[in-house]
Amino acid sequence: MQAIAVLQGNELIYMEIQNIIERIHDEVKPLSAYGKVADYIPALKNVNPDQLGICVQTLDDKTFGVGQCETPFSIQSISKVFGLTLAYKALGGEIWQRLGKEPSGTAFNSLVQLEYEKGIPRNPFINAGALVISDIILSRYKFARRELLEFVRDVSGDARVDYNEDVARSEREHGYRNAALAYLMKSYGNIHNPVEDVLDFYFLQCSLEMKTTSLAKAFLYLANHGVVPFSGKQILTPSQAKRLNSLMITCGLYNEAGDFAYRVGLPGKSGVGGGIVAIIPKKLSICVWSPALNAFGNSLAGIEALERFTTYTKVSVF
Ligand code: GLN
């Protein structure tokens, strides 16, 4: 068991992270029985819901894990953070000409707002926004598939991260709502590449598979003013990293973002594969994975685990 030093206010406290996540694991694991795995993507519907992995990765390179923390899972919408990072790196604030920065208050795959708001998605984390981001990446990166994968391998330090082409194909075959969103935006001129190419790239991005340990590590640049701590590479400027974290607080969990902020108090991003990653600036990142989802499409046990983590450690951004 390792203990790490965490600065809280003016007081230096020592927490036994491993003990805390083991306790949380045992407490919240039974909750997975009350959720439901995402079945609208056929390739995901056979995942065993009774799984829970938690990994905490500190900026000073300590890793704490429990449960299925080394099992690769479909990161789905968590990948939107990587996509946004690449688009933001390439275009800076220009991306906001094509999408907003406001919480949507609607489901991640909702179509209703998009018509009223003339094809401009509310934010980059709902599906419509992530499709615009995919379009930007296709325009700005010549080898988009390869460059995205290399980027994720680089920031996670895990060369085995890969796309799952079966999951991408499965979603492609059933992704009618995403196709509807993309075509609607195309009609407003907010998709520049062929819709089919944008959808292919978006589904591929969502199909990335990672384990909680790699995903927690991959988010460290967001906890560290845009710099990957173990390589020293500057991914985003400190200001861009701040803004991306702010977007995760307000929009990272879609129409459950307010409740998540209230309960957990951290910037976070979820995916329908059951993963959630959250960061504590200048300290650590934490990834939880439990595939059974609540009605908002977010991991039921995952949110509970994160709420308990900030409650038991008394550390959040507030
Ligand atoms: N690939 C999924 C979709 O487009 C991602 C959604 C999610 O993880 N919330 O529906």
Image (spheres, helix red, strand yellow):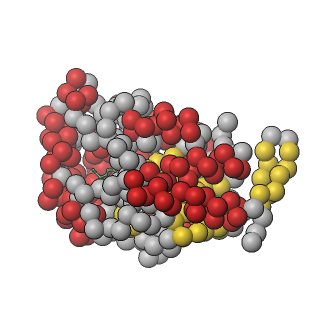
Q: Front-most of 251 and 107?
A: 107
Q: Front-most of 285 and 260?
A: 260
Q: Front-most of 118 and 264?
A: 264
Quadrant of image for the C terminus: top right
Query: Residue drawn 39% across and 53% down?
Result: 34
Q: Toward which corner of the image does residue 142 lie, by quadrant?
A: bottom left
Quadrant of image for the N terminus: bottom right
Measured as percent of width and height from the top left, residue 72 is found at 42, 71
Residue at the extreme top: 116
Q: Toward which corner of the image does residue 182 lie, by quadrant?
A: top left
Query: Residue drawn 15% across and 48% down?
Result: 176
Query: Residue drawn 50% across and 71% down?
Result: 68
> Is 209 placed left or right of 172 in the picture?
right
Measured as percent of width and height from the top left, residue 123 is found at 37, 35
Measured as percent of width and height from the top left, residue 315 is found at 70, 46
Residue at the extreme bottom: 160
Measured as percent of width and height from the top left, residue 149 is found at 39, 66
> Is 120 placed left or right of 265 in the picture?
left
